[in-house]
Amino acid sequence: MTGQASSGAAPMLVLDDVTAGYGDFQALFGVSLDVKAGEAVAVIGPNGAGKSTLMRAISGMILLKGGTVVMEGQRLSEVAPHKIVEMGIAHVPENRRLFPRMSVEENLRVGSFAPPFRAKYADRLEFVYTLFPRMKERRNQLAGTMSGGEQQMCAIGRALMSDPKILLMDEPSAGLAPVIVQQVFELIRKIRADGLTVLIVEQNVQQVLKVVDRAYLLEAGTIRHSGLAADLLGSEDIRRAYIGV
Ligand SMILES: Nc1ncnc2c1ncn2[C@@H]1O[C@H](COP(=O)(O)OP(=O)(O)OP(=O)(O)O)[C@@H](O)[C@H]1O
Ligand SMILES: [Mg+2]
């Protein structure tokens, strides 16, 4: 593949001075970051830092109080929130948020619900079932009765149904057994190899830094540090604060 993370190209996604919160409470204070086409970028930081809020601000689940989010040159504030997915942004939310009493396949269908995606439904379903043969086997099972790892696959599959350009993943490995966590990181490698751009929030700092190109460190709603994943992995401060070795 050419052009991956190429230096001269305009970034796919750009956040500039974003502030956001809930009611009077401010959770993000002037956050700026960018993600280039083909890149995988991580956001790491302690509990309550604002990582999920950042993901919600990008996918339109919450409105910005200030600043801009621009996807391929278009400001998201000019787009109705439900249209953001049509611009190629898919969000795998924290805690998966599947419909537990709907089947796996019905949950996947939700991901291609928007009118422009419906024509591609069969192709996308085939794609997701090829990526996750387990989902095909379990397609009629109620999502709420699947294991944590299976539910995560279903949530990622649902996001992939819209054939996104960028996938936002909020703690995909949370609550999973170590062996399943490994599978999730393997999957992220696979998704990247397919050319998809990824922005991921993860508590498993050491593991995520091995599958992304760059990372931002968010603390108390502010970007404290950013750099190449390899450099952060080698940084004494990051290791001490986030990896614990
Ligand atoms: N729906 C909400 N209403 C009010 N406050 C909220 C809401 N969601 C989050 N917050 C607050 O915003 C701040 C940032 O929360 P956020 O969920 O973005 O953190 P996080 O970095 O994702 O944390 P974690 O690692 O625990 O998932 C926290 O102080 C949190 O209490
Ligand atoms: Mg969170």
Image (cartoon, rainbow, N blue to C red):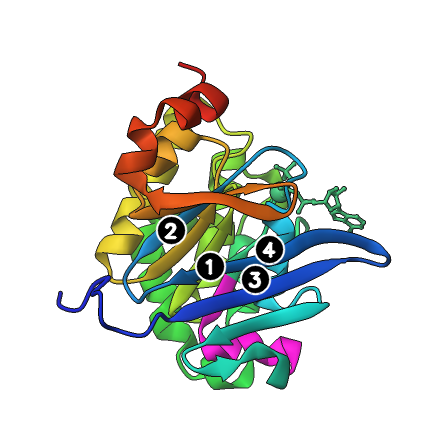
Would the CB of label 4 be found within 8 Å of ligand 1?
yes
Tags 2 and 1 in contact by the CB under 8 Å rule? Answer: yes
Position of residue 115 relative to residue 3, above or below, is below
Q: Earlier in the sequence, mark 1 or mark 4?
A: 1
Under circle 1, the secondary element is strand
In the image as oriented, which residue stretches furthest toward the top?
A: 245
Task: Name the residue carrying label 3.
Answer: 106
Position of residue 188 relative to residue 244, above or below, is below
Residue 228 painted magenta: no
Count of marks placed on residues: 4
Task: Name the residue carrying label 2.
Answer: 41
Give the CA separation, mark 2 to mark 4. Answer: 13 Å
Position of residue 151 relative to residue 13, above or below, is above
Q: Earlier in the sequence, mark 1 or mark 3?
A: 1
Front disc: 3 or 2: 2
Give amino acid for label 3. Answer: Glu
Are there few (<14), some (14-19), or many (20+) residues within 10 Å of tag 4?
Answer: many
Q: Specify whether 50 is left or right of 148.
A: right
Give amino acid for label 2. Answer: Val
Q: Which mark is residue 238?
A: none
Look at the image and give the residue range highlighted in magenta: 79-90
Q: Earlier in the sequence, mark 2 or mark 1?
A: 1
Q: Which mark is residue 54?
A: 4
Front disc: 1 or 4: 1
Give the CA separation, mark 3 to mark 2. Answer: 30 Å
Q: Earlier in the sequence, mark 2 or mark 4?
A: 2
Q: Specify whether 59 is left or right of 133.
A: right
> Toward which corner of the image does residue 197 lie, by quadrant?
bottom left
